[in-house]
Image (cartoon, rainbow, N blue to C red):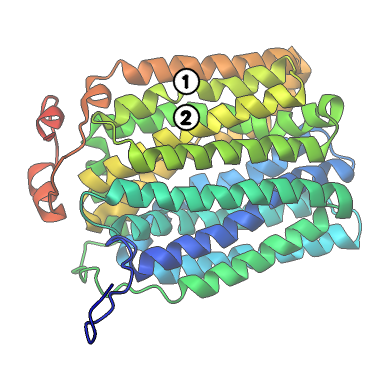
Amino acid sequence: MTSAGSPTERPRLPSWAGRNYKLLTASAVVTNLGSNGALIAAAFAVLEAGGDAGDVGLVAAARTLPLVLFLLIGGAIADRLPRHHVMVAANALNCLSQAVFAALVLAGEPRLWQMMLLTALGGTGQAFFGPAAEGMLLSSVEGDQAARAFAVFRMAMQSAALGGAAVGGALVAVLGPGWVLAVDAVAFAVAGALRSFLDVSHIPVRGPSGGLFADLREGWREFAGRSWLWVIVVQFAVANAVIGAAQSVYGPLVARDSLGGAGPWGLALAMFGAGTVAGAVLMTRWKPRRLLLAGTLCVFPLALPAAALAVPVPIGVLCAVMFVTGVTEEVFGVSWMTALHQEIPEDKLSRVSAYDWFGSVAMLPLAMALAGPAEHTFGRTPALWGCAALIVVVTAGALSVRDVRHLTRRTKEVTRDTAQKTQETPAKGELESTGG
């Protein structure tokens, strides 16, 4: 009990849960609730309009192509302008494109070129949003609790993805894809409003630079000078491409033909979301010393969903596979964010994130566009087995690089200024010495 007259202490939030962090988390929850259902809705909108695997792949590729074209510019702009302004403008574009997409689907049969154009606008918004959002999040936390902050953020985000996928799949089955796309448009509007209140006063004012291309060159030097960074990005250029083909193109088709349609497929995606939540909970407690060794080992299970769809396994088994995959993916995701936060100077975060995103999605349009022809040429089952095999091969290749195996978590806080001075171009062997 407190004595008379003594002040009653309020429960204190963790030091990393500041205003920006809470706004970023809340807005990410809102967008993930809408977007995960919308991904299912877009695929089934194409199928309900009479499209086939090739058409689903073309619409998916139309979203990823602008990412490849505009990501680097988006990263440079996010390091030059207030990041929250870039994020809000991107959310506005996403809101508009999804609203028009929803209206076309609700009004009747949308044409393929219309769906491709609108998803391309959504991809353009994401190209500018992604680097700005990642830079904003990484700069919103400091200290040795950064990994826990990222894990909690991802736990909230993936919990929303869990709910969004499950509810979205059910709503597509009951109401049709148009209404799910409309909900996503509203979610972007709400999230954009929340992000408009972000505070960037703590970010140092950036001095004059040599222009956009000079900023891009500086970001490239920061990216290329770290072998662990570009090796992992190359690994995910391949892995994300085949995962995208397997889950965005082949997954809905397998669901339609063998699993019972949109509802079961939404449940499988929801179990993946549940796995990511469990993985995030794990990462609030577990702090692997060798960040990328632990994370990259957990990439191998990402081959399992493609293999499960190739069989195809019953929906219960597929849900179990998706859950395990979600857990391991989240171990990698938190480890990766912690490595970027630890190693990259604040004023270059968005540019480095842009190169990261660019490499990670560069092959997606090609993979999406070729998914349909690959099915016609080789068959769906061999194509899915090929996806699984490629994930295993590129992950083994990444693990062969010493800096990936040896990048070490620091046990005490090192300021970004110190990191910038001492790690502009780390040589092999230096990464291990940064550990406590």
| Amino acid type, label 1 | Phe
Residue 432, image x and y in percent?
Answer: 14, 28
Give the vertical position of 425 relative to 7 (above or below): above
Q: Label 2: state its secondary structure.
A: helix
The residue that mark 2 highlights is 328
Q: Label 1: state its secondary structure.
A: helix
Residue drawn at (37%, 49%) of the image: 150
The residue that mark 1 highlights is 300
Neighbour tally class for label 2: few under 14, some 14-19, many 20 plus, Cα within 10 Å: many
Q: Quadrant of residue 356?
A: top left
Give the vertical position of 402 relative to 81 (above or below): above
Residue drawn at (84%, 51%) of the image: 111
Residue 425, image x and y in percent?
Answer: 14, 38
Relative side of 164 to 255, left or right:
left
Relative side of 358 to 436, left or right:
right
Q: Quadrant of residue 265?
A: top right
Q: Is residue 367 visible?
A: no
As drawn, the residue found furthest toward the bottom would be 5
Foreground: disc 2 or disc 1: 2
Residue drawn at (87%, 55%) of the image: 175
Give the vertical position of 372 relative to 280 (above or below): above
Cβ–Cβ below 8 Å for labels 2 and 1?
yes
